[in-house]
Amino acid sequence: MTKILLTTTSFQDTPGEHHKLLADTGWEIIRARGPLNEADTLALVGDIDGYICGDDMITKAVLEKALPKLKVISKYGIGVDKIDVKSCTAFGIPLLFTPGVNHTTVAEHCFLLLLSLEKNLLFHTDSTRANTWKRKTGHELLEKTIGIIGLGRIGKEVAIRARAFGMNVIAHDIYWDEKFATANNVKRAANLDEIYAASDYISLHTNLTPETRDMISAKSFPKMKKGVLIINCARGEVVHTADMVEALKSGQVGGYGTDVLDEEPPSPNHPLLKLPNVVCTPHVASRTYESVVRQATAAVKNLILAMHGEKPLAQINPEVPVKKVV
């Protein structure tokens, strides 16, 4: 029987049509609770034909053990920085993904983090629950400038919502959509330094690449406004953790709202979790019922199409042909 490894927890924990779609294939589903490290992933591959993965570590060693049986990897989501894409391509394994399914949800989460910082939400809920009734004065978003690094699908949704709050929007992206920018009054920054200098808030929406790793660091903080708030719903490794901790302690960075960390799940002594000007959520920006169903359905449809030798909805390495397996 065809065997499929499924590791994404939000897929498994959220009701919806994606469960029936997968069950109707008649394939044997092997379930695990991801995201998995390399050792755990290695232990589960070798006898699976297809793989619906989340943020599991899929290294060259994992792929070598998975072959020759593994035929297709269907990524639930869009980030593939935990997957050895080059090895997938070299080994002829189609790597599928699900763009365009979670941009609304993630953009909303960015404003959850931003408003939590500017309105001192955690301090106020804690003081109310403790019956101390302590209060801090917050700030409005109106007429503040938000700098968006990465004006893709999610960045655009952030820009739209920022304009609704009456904010000024400046953005940087290599692939610039002039039509969108004009329609939504988004100023184009010539470089990242212009974003840093102009922004009261900086929202990160870039992929994790060798160029973007540690992009936000001790080198970039002095170029920013003192007290800037930084929002990260991209990848934890885009920010250099130790440098961020020091900038938060010194007041150079006024607050950090993040849904991602360089270590997930974090160790109990992770330095960012001890600071009062940090709001951190456990990588749930895309985890709403609506978004999960969209992502999961797309991931299953991708897998089914590829396993039957048909063109999937979206493929990271389209140069690798899909071959009929079932």
Image (spheres, grey):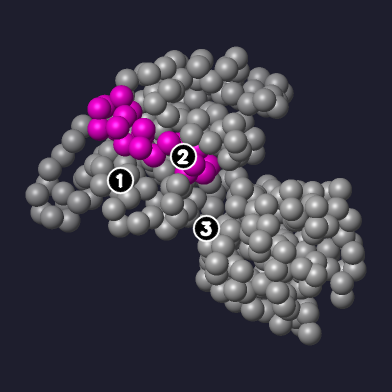
Q: Earlier in the sequence, mark 3 or mark 2?
A: 2
Q: Secondary structure at mark 1?
A: helix
Q: Residue at x 48, y 34 (%)?
A: 214
Dot 1 corresponds to which residue?
271
Instruction: Tell me where residue 46 appears, x and y as whole percent.
Output: 70, 74
The CA span between labels 3 and 1 is: 28 Å
- Residue 186 is drawn in which quadrant? top right
Q: Secondary structure at mark 3?
A: loop
- Residue 131 is drawn in which quadrant? bottom left
Q: Is residue 297 visible?
A: no
The CA span between labels 3 and 2 is: 18 Å
Callout 2 amino acid: Asn
Dot 3 corresponds to which residue?
288
Instruction: Tell me where residue 128 appears, x and y as whole percent.
Output: 17, 51
Image-based side of 126 in relation to 10, left or right: left
Dot 2 corresponds to which residue?
232
Crowdedness near tag 1: few (<14), some (14–19) or many (≥20) residues, C-alpha within 10 Å? some
Image-based side of 25 in relation to 200, left or right: right
Viewer-nearest residue: 199 or 212:
212
Q: Earlier in the sequence, mark 3 or mark 1?
A: 1
Magenta region: 232-253
Callout 1 amino acid: Pro
